[in-house]
Image (spheres, grey):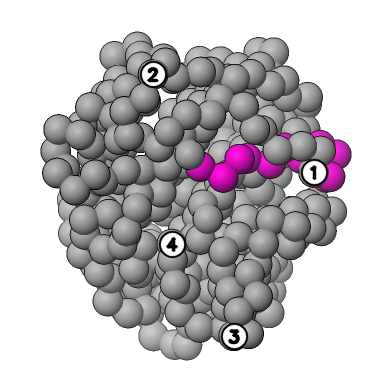
Amino acid sequence: MTTPDAWRAVLETLVETGHLVGPADLGRTVTEAVAPTGAEAVLYLVDYEQRTLRPMPPATGEPEPVDGSAAGRAFAVGRTVAGPPAWVPVVNGTERLGVLRVVPPPGADPYPTLAGARLVAGMAGHLITAKNLYGDDLQRIRRSRPMTPAADLLWKLLPPLTFASRQLVVTAVLEPCYEVGGDAFDYAVDGDVARLAIYDAVGKGMRAALATAATLGAVRAGRVGGAGLAEGAAAADRVLVDEFRDSRFVTAVLAELSLSDGRLRYVNAGHPPPVLLRAGRAVRTLDGGGRTPLGVLAGDTPVAEAVFEPGDRLLLYTDGVTEARDPFGAQFGLDRLVALAESVAAEDLPAAETLRRMSHAVIDHQAGSPRDDATLVMVEWSPAAAARAVP
């Protein structure tokens, strides 16, 4: 019976069984926990490309496309799509993981079922994130083809693709997701300060991945220890010079955003300048704070400043985005990227969905395997954007 008490019992079951369940059994655990209500429930996980939603075992059936399906619409906009079947977004915080397919009991009022299913989807998101660390089954479901060792290394170092607080959304996308070797991003939101970074190591493959990993670790260690932007850049310089003998370097943007007054401080180590969007329009590139790439020793590191207004978006990207070429050799280019950001912003989508669509536009422009890593990061300082990120 789909009563509040019945769905409370489902949550209790998930909490109690969740202590001992392994990654391979999560799908079965959720389906069996919901069964006493008379409803049917199946978990689907999104693949790394964010193009397909895949049923978790023991469920069978065809995957659901993110574009052009009811399941995909629930995932994309973060809202329940009524059915039957109904599709409920599954997130951990605001990190999009998949959807929950729900069929209410025959002849029953569907609304109590949907209300209960939203609670189950929330618990499932937390369980998926927690159990992912203890096995490989969830990663197997999400992968459509083998991942290179370099890509596997970097993915395990990255924070979740999306985070939101009451004032801020940070979201990122990396392509090609199975072969990325030198690109990475990072963030940490503590109190009223958001710290952000995007990296692009010279070269490809494992050597590039190792350089990026070393840089990421050096900047993080300094950040946790209280280092500022210039000190973090200096720590990256040292580790790259000490550990690599082939003049290995990494371009980067390191930034700090004050969530109390919108003041942005940043360093640009030989990286493409970020783009500031205001009211859905690109208003400027952030051209200050320039220094040599990380690993190329220089003098003092200048720290530039800019001021955010409520609702502003900052778009960071690697050169694999703007230098992506179509079959005729035409680059995607900064102008096209800016126009795309403006057009997608007009759709008033969650920030993560905005970036997913932009990333796919870059991939589709190439009509084939990307020649270089392509990473996008978007930061939005806006309570409204944070609210859109919540299912």
Q: Position of residue 263 (x, y in %)?
A: 66, 17
Q: CA distance from mark 4 to mark 3?
A: 17 Å
Q: Position of residue 241 (x, y in %)?
A: 20, 34
For the point 44% across and 72% down, the residue is 371
Of the residues tagged 3 and 1, which is closer to the observer? 3
The residue closer to the viewer here, 104 or 290, is 290
The residue pinned by badge 2 equals 299
The residue pinned by badge 3 equals 327
Q: CA distance from mark 3 to mark 2?
A: 42 Å
Amino acid tagged 3:
Pro
Of the residues tagged 4 and 3, which is closer to the observer? 3
Residue 40 appears in the figure = no
Amino acid tagged 4:
Asp
Q: Which mark is residue 373?
A: 4
Numbered disc 2: secondary structure:
loop
The quarter of the displayed image where residue 378 is located: top right
Residue stretch in magenta: 271-281
Of the residues tagged 3 and 2, which is closer to the observer? 2
Q: Quadrant of the N terminus?
A: bottom right
The quarter of the displayed image where residue 264 is located: top right
Mark 4 vs mark 3: which is more N-terminal?
3
- Crowding around mark 1 (Cα neighbors within 10 Å: few <14, some 14 to 19, many 20+) is some
The residue pinned by badge 1 equals 282
For the point 20% across and 64% down, the residue is 149
Q: Position of residue 100 (x, y in %)?
A: 51, 65
